[in-house]
Amino acid sequence: MDIAVIGSNMVDLITYMERMPEEGETLEAPEFEMGCGGKGANQAIAAGRLGSDVLMVTKVGNDLFGQNTIENFKNNGIRTEAVEVGTRTSGVAPIFVDPHAKNRILIIQGANNELRPESLEQHRPAIKEVKLIILQLEIPLETVYAAIDMGVEMGIPVLLNPAPANPELDIEYVKKCTYFAPNESELGILTGLPVSSLAEIKAAAATLVDKGVNNMIVTMGDKGVLWMDGQNELVIEGKKVDAIDTTGAGDSFIGCFAHYLTKGESIEYSLGKANLYAAQAVQKRGTQSSYPTKQEFTAY
């Protein structure tokens, strides 16, 4: 196996709107879509569509949404032997997309909160076979820490995407990861520093590198991506496209980056491919539904 994604699954409830209603106001929105999402699931699907062999470790809800999520994994070639059914309802993410493709997202964790360290231990034999572990922060922090320790113990590189940003994230665990990949706003929350320009983003990222964080990868939307590791500093400019929906773009980046990395490509090459993959994804509506297949990406 190539990748174990230990993380969340959600049902995306996407409303396309002209503007947010004011307090007490009711507005009609032009369109609504529902799809499978969640940062963990999104990253797994992106890597899987590109041809990676992906193990998903997650908890789905004890409801129709949960069963649909499992079927979605199977339909996208994701291994589901480590997908468990919890006692709560499925996690859901109401998403509001404006005419400029900017989004606002609410998250209800649901069964994702039941993914505990004990679950990881049950699936240790399968996790041990992978080349890379991917984590996010839509599951309990104690589970994230247990997964990092498991990766270190097994000698498996860990990629932590600190999303959504949690100020309580322990820097000592971040330093154990091989790759740390926040977006610019998450970087600002975690460091408490301004990130409104490239110079400020570099300065904020450098503070974490100075503390011992390995391979800082900061995604910056249409500005591209920054990579720092103490010896190297690289900025790959964003590809200019007409974005329709940026929901899940960061997850598509992570999934694509992990795919090429586990195929033996360099960090620089993998970052470049991931930058292009995310640029292609934002030109379609939806989250996972916007992620290109290997054939579509090659043609792009």
Image (cartoon, rainbow, N blue to C red):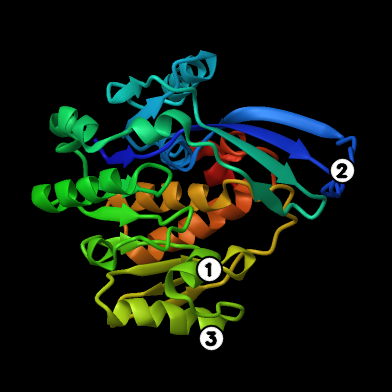
Secondary structure type for disc 2:
loop
Q: Label 1: how many residues lie within 10 Å, few (<14), some (14-19) or many (20+)?
A: many
Which one is nearer the viewer's eye here, 9 or 92? 92
Quadrant in the rendering for residue 34: top right
Q: In the image, what residue type sits under mark 1?
A: Glu
Rendered location of residue 198, percent (x, y): 56, 81
Secondary structure, mark 1, is: helix
**Cβ atoms at labels 1 and 2 below 8 Å apart:** no
Of the residues under marks 2 and 3, which one precedes in the sequence?
A: 2
**Location of residue 125 in the rendering, given as x and y in whole percent from the top left corner:** 13, 31
281 relative position to 148: left or right: right
- Residue 266 seen anywhere in this rendered image of the structure: no
Write the residue at 61% across / 70% down: 223
Q: Which residue is mark 2?
A: 24
Q: Are marks 3 and 1 in contact (CB under 8 Å)?
A: no
Image quarter of residue 59: top left
Q: Which mark is residue 199?
A: 3
**Looking at numbered disc 3 in the image, what kind of residue is underneath it?**
Ala
Tell which of 79 and 212 is nearer to you.
212
Residue at the image position 57 percent from the left and 46 percent from the top: 248
- Distance between the alpha carbons at the discs numbered 1 and 2: 33 Å
Q: Which mark is residue 184?
A: 1
Residue density around tag 2, few if under 14, some if 14–19, many if 20 or more, within 10 Å: few
In this view, 66 is above or below 261: above
